[in-house]
Amino acid sequence: MTRTPPEALAVLRQAAAQHAAARHRLHLVPSENRLSLAARLPHLMDAAVRYAFPGPEDGDENWAWPGRTDLVAVERTAAALLGAQLGAEFLNLKPVSGVSALTVALSALAGSGASVFNLAERDGGHGSTRFIGTRLGLRMKDLPVDPATCTLDLDALARALGAGPRPELVYLDAFMCLFPFDLPGLREVVGRQAVIHYDASHTLGLIASGAWQNPLTEGADTLGGSTHKTYPGPHKGVLATNDQGLAARLDEHASHFVSHHHPAGVVALAVAAAEMDARGHQYAHATVSHARRLGTALAGRGFTVCGEKAGFTASHQLWIDIAPMMDAEQASRRLFEAGIVVNAIPLPHITADAGLRLGLQEVTWAGMREDGIDELAEVFTAVLRDGQDPADVAPRTRALAEVYQPDEGTDEQIVRIALAAAGIGGDA
């Protein structure tokens, strides 16, 4: 048996230390989620090191890459499960991330020099959309947003378009999202010929479980995004549509932008999709309910929570303008010292440079109930409003986190066995 080199052991010890510390924190970052033990296992299997391509005929062996028919079959299963959840006939699982899906979509859905509308970063648009679109030769333009409602200003868009040509593509890329888009209204403004692409990276799990608008039934032509935020899957991406012609374009461009789409991730995604079939409806609706409950609780304790007039949020996200109390990075640091991980990040339509962006999906997937959300509000209040020492509050957070940890007899035992097999003893 080959011994693990000392340098590799040092790297594993560092990762194991991070793993152990993370278990005692509550993670409220909107772009992350837990991955079940079952969905982690494929990354320890042969699938983690193989390519997997279908044969020339459906179900046939590919003799350029033989012995992969089981992995190809799993990919079909994953596509079928996700397609049913999203209401999509055509699924492409080649993207390896949300930005990978974004790149494929921009390339496939608009020709060089085309006019493409997306959300400006100041309005919650993803920072990569404009850069990638411009590099692809697209003429990127801002979708107007009403600051009072954090939603599209369709009247302003109609005025901007006037009697001129409609855009070739509208790319809805909100990674800061509290409320759904008016997709039927957007379709009326931009016309039937424009392609509307909905980036569902943040809301995919809510869409799949009926807790958020279904873009493909409300007017979007295509949908894409990552699979590890509200969708509790691996770090991968997906593209979906009910239009056969658009599906062919997405497939063609994906095949050139992604040469190897990580079969272990595909297997993990199939596992996550089955888990979502089993418990996704309850989880997704509880996620939105928890976000609103925390927003209400914090607002009642003197915090400035965005979107209050509309019920704070209709998604997993919650935005706090923390500037009246302290700097956002200071607030994030104090919460981290108390065992809570949040984003200190620029928020749309606040005057401060940054605020706090929270996500309730990970703790909800872990099983947190309403009493846990109420305790979260108390911890926030103690650390940020009342100025209590985070070290004194940390035991409350740790106690709350331990309630929602995976069973020590399964997940952690397997991690310890794997570390021991690599030559590292002790706790993970």
Image: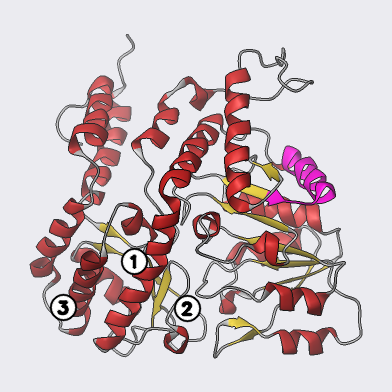
Residue 223 lies, in percent from the top left, at 67, 56
Q: Which residues are magenta?
A: 240-256
- Disc 1 from disc 2: Cα separation: 13 Å
Q: Is 398 placed above or below 238 here? A: below
Residue 259 lies, in percent from the top left, at 68, 34
Our reading of the magenta stretch's main secondary structure is: helix
Which residue appears farthest toward the left when viewing the image? 392
Residue 251 within the segment the image draws in magenta: yes
User: Does residue 71 appear left or right of residue 53 in this picture?
Assistant: left
Residue tagged 3? 382
Amino acid type shown at disc 3: Ala
* Disc 3 + disc 1, Cβ < 8 Å: no
Q: Secondary structure at mark 3?
A: helix
Residue tagged 2? 347
The quarter of the rendered structure image containing the C terminus is top left
Residue 411 lies, in percent from the top left, at 26, 35
Residue 334 lies, in percent from the top left, at 22, 71
Which sits earlier in the primary sequence, circle 3 or circle 1?
1
- Disc 2 from disc 3: Cα separation: 23 Å
Instruction: Judge the density around disc 2: few (<14), some (14-19), many (≥20) Cα neighbours within 10 Å.
Output: many
Residue tagged 1? 342
* The label number, if any, that marks residue 274 in the structure image: none
Which sits earlier in the primary sequence, circle 1 or circle 2?
1
Q: Residue at point 47% right, 87% down? A: 350
